[in-house]
Image (spheres, rainbow, N blue to C red):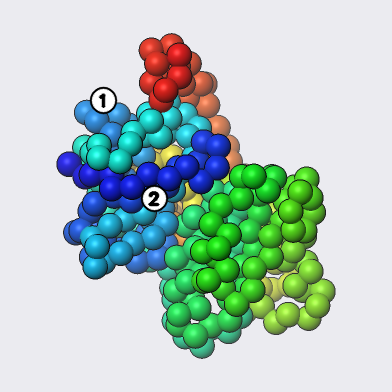
Amino acid sequence: MFKILDKKVLSPGVYQFDIEAPRVAKKAEPGQFIVLRVNEEGERIPLTIADFDRAKGTITIIFQAVGASTELLGSMNAGESLLDFVGPLGQPSHIQGGMGTIVCIGGGIGVAPVYPIARGMKDAGNKVISIMGAKTKDILILEDAMKAASNEVLVTTDDGSYGIKGFVTTALQQLVDRGEKIDQVTAIGPVVMMRSVVEATRPLGIKTIVSLNPIMVDGTGMCGGCRVQVGDETKFACVDGPEFDGHIVDFKGLMSRQRMYREQETVEKDHACHIGLGGKK
C-alpha cells in the first residue's frame, strides 16, 4: 500500500498528492511516469511524475478529475493509501548542459509534468524560458514553482484574464519576434495544443519534443494500447516514450485513437455518478 502523505487542491478539480513511494522516488527522473490503482476494482491510471524527493521517499502527482477513476482518486484524502503505485516507467527526458535556450511549454495540467523538466534543464546550466497556458487565471497552476525553475516565464490565458491574451503559441511567436534563439522546445499538454506548437516550430526548424499520454493498460508495452506512429515506425509511448520528436508524430492518428473509447468513458462516468463515486450523487 502507498500512503497519501499530503493532498492539495490546486484549482477546481485539480489535485496534488504527495505519495510515500521510496523505491520509486529513488529511481525517478524528469519525464517519467507512474501507473496507479486506487483499489482492486480500479483501472490503471498513468500519470506523469510532477516531482520527486529522494530524501523523503516521495513522489508528487498532479491530476485533473475528468472521469470516474480520477474522480474517485480525487475523493481520497491524506492518510489513505493506494493499492498499486508502479514506476518509474518510460524513458526519462534528455537533459544535459550546453543545450542552449530551452523553451518549456505547459498547457493546462501539462504544466505539472513540464515542471521537473524545466528545473532539470536549468540546473544543468541551460537557459530556460517557460510558457504556461490556461483558459483562465483561476485554473493556472504551479506559477511560483515554474518561476523558480526558469530564467523567464510567460503566462497566457485564453480569455486574457492574466498575462498574455491568447494561446501558448502566441507567446512562442513573441519570443521568435524578439529574436530569441531557441534551440529546443518541449511541449506538454492537450494533444491539440502540442500539435499547434509543432506546426508553429516546423517552418522555423526548431527541434520540438512532445510528451504523449495515449490510452495505456499495463505500461509495459505488452498490450499495445499506447501505440503511436512516429515517422515510419510504430512506437509504444509507455516504453519508447513518452517523449518523441513532435515533427514526425502522427497527430491525426493519435487523436483518432483517443476518441475510440469516448462512449465507454461516458457510460462509466455516468455509472460512477449514480453510485456516488468521487463525491458525486
Q: Quadrant of residue 124?
A: bottom left
Label 1 SS: loop
User: Which residue is at 51% across, 64% downward?
Assistant: 145
Residue in the foreground of this view, choosing between 214 and 153: 153
Query: Which residue is found at the position 45% from the left and 14% from the top?
Result: 281
Q: Is residue 42 above or below residue 129?
A: above
Query: Is residue 185 visible to us here?
Result: no
Look at mark 2 in the image and give the residue it sits on.
Answer: 61
The answer to whether residue 9 is left or right of residue 249 is left
Q: Position of residue 227 (x, y in %)?
A: 43, 47
In 3D space, how far apart are the residues under numbered discs 1 and 2 (Cα atoms)?
21 Å
Secondary element under disc 2, as helix, strand or loop, is: strand
Q: Nearer the viewer, residue 136 or 187?
A: 136
Q: Residue furthest top?
A: 274
Q: How many residues crowd around disc 2 within 10 Å: few (fewer than 14), some, or many (20 or more)?
A: many
Q: Position of residue 152 (x, y in %)?
A: 64, 74
Vertical position of residue 43 compared to residue 269: above or below: below
Instruction: Decide which of 106, 137 is in the foreground and name it.
Output: 137
Return the x and y of residue 136 as percentages of the image width and height. Answer: 69, 45
Is 275 located above or below residue 162 in the figure? above
Quarter of the image holding residue 209? bottom right
Give the amino acid type for the residue marked by disc 2 in the picture. Answer: Ile
Whether 246 is drawn above or below 236: the answer is below
Q: Which quarter of the rendering shows the N terminus?
A: top left
The amino acid beneath tag 1 is: Glu
Point 60% across, 77% down: residue: 151
> Where does label 1 land, which residue?
41
On the question of residue 145 being in view, the answer is yes
- Given residues 137 and 219, the one toward you in this image is 137
